[in-house]
Amino acid sequence: MKNFALIGAAGYIAPRHMKAIKDTNNQLIAALDTNDSVGIIDSYFPDADFFTEFERFDRHIDKLRRVNKGRAVDYVSICSPNYLHDSHMRFALRSGADAICEKPLVLNPWNIDGLIEIERESERKVNTILQLRLHPSIIALRNKVTNSSRGKKIEVDLTYITSRGHWYLQSWKGDDKKSGGIATNIGVHFYDMLHYVFGRLQENRVHHSSATKAAGYLEYENARVRWFLSIDSNDIPQDLRASGHRTYRSIIADGESVEFSGGFTDLHTQSYDQILQGNGFGLEENRVAIETVAHIRTAKLTPLEGDFHPFLKRVLEP
């Protein structure tokens, strides 16, 4: 049984990590969040020590490491705001633990290089949650692309709309310096998936970028991808919106839909299983996706000519 600590216990994604720790028969012994609305811990690890101040959490983790009567932390799971991931992974490694970090791993690709150095110095490892690489439909698509002898690139439309209320832009997620912007915050795992399935990234153009939606074009070795991301519920197709849908995911590859709307609930547990077996995705596996979103964040917009996502035309119509 391994000992876990959790940073960001009040975050949206933290319960999936708590569930994964419990489902893999391990224990959460300490948790941290500046927000104390963390009653969800009682459903999983009611005996875990909880802190609202990093300094006291740091002291506690250090004491467990030094006393080490079976209580030293083996893994630190990180669900904190995006801009803090780099610092919290460094803390984990320097505390003698491996890190398990939510997406995005970091906001800028050069942060990966610094973490690689600390991995080497500490002899600990950073693992990340790239859950779409474990999704059966995505694995099947990758196998199909890998085994195909065709020379023509696949034409792909990727659409992801996840409705968010007015709170979103008032939180840290609405601050590009803290979240990285919408493409980083809700899109980074899709860009990782595209690279994983379709190979080396060759071109990256941005057609639209705002606080609530973004769109662009990516070209890979084996695909040409038009993508559209949004947190605006008005972008959900009208028939689905009328029936109460708040999320819309779609991948169309050469006119055929790739069904991946379900199957997400256990992917964190599967990720933890792989990490505990020594098969977690590390720093370098994240590099292309982080380079992709960093470019999207700073790129000049490309005029809307040639290939652009059909949803974008509808958004821009008066």
Image: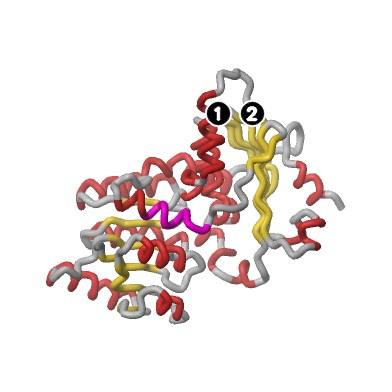
Q: Secondary structure at mark 2?
A: strand
- Dot 1: few (<14), some (14–19), or many (≥20) neighbours within 10 Å? some
Q: Considering the numbered disc 1 on the image, is that residue within a helix, a strand or a loop? A: helix
* Residue 242 image position (x, y, % from top left): 80, 62
Dot 2, how many residues are within 10 Å of its Cα: few (below 14), some (14-19), or many (20+)?
A: many
| Residue 42 percent location from the top left of the image | 40, 79
**Residue 194 falls in image quadrant:** top right
Tag of residue 145: 1
Give the answer, above or below, for where 70 lies relative to 293: below
- The residue tagged 2 is 154
In the picture, residue 232 is in which quadrant? bottom right
Q: Which residues are magenta?
A: 265-272
Q: Is residue 268 magenta?
A: yes
- Above or below, 242 against 10 in this view is above
Q: Residue at x 28, y 50 (%)?
A: 125
User: Is the Cβ of the residue at disc 1 closer than 8 Å to that at disc 2?
Assistant: yes
Residue farthest along the right direction in this orientation: 318
Nearer to us in this view, 297 or 279: 279
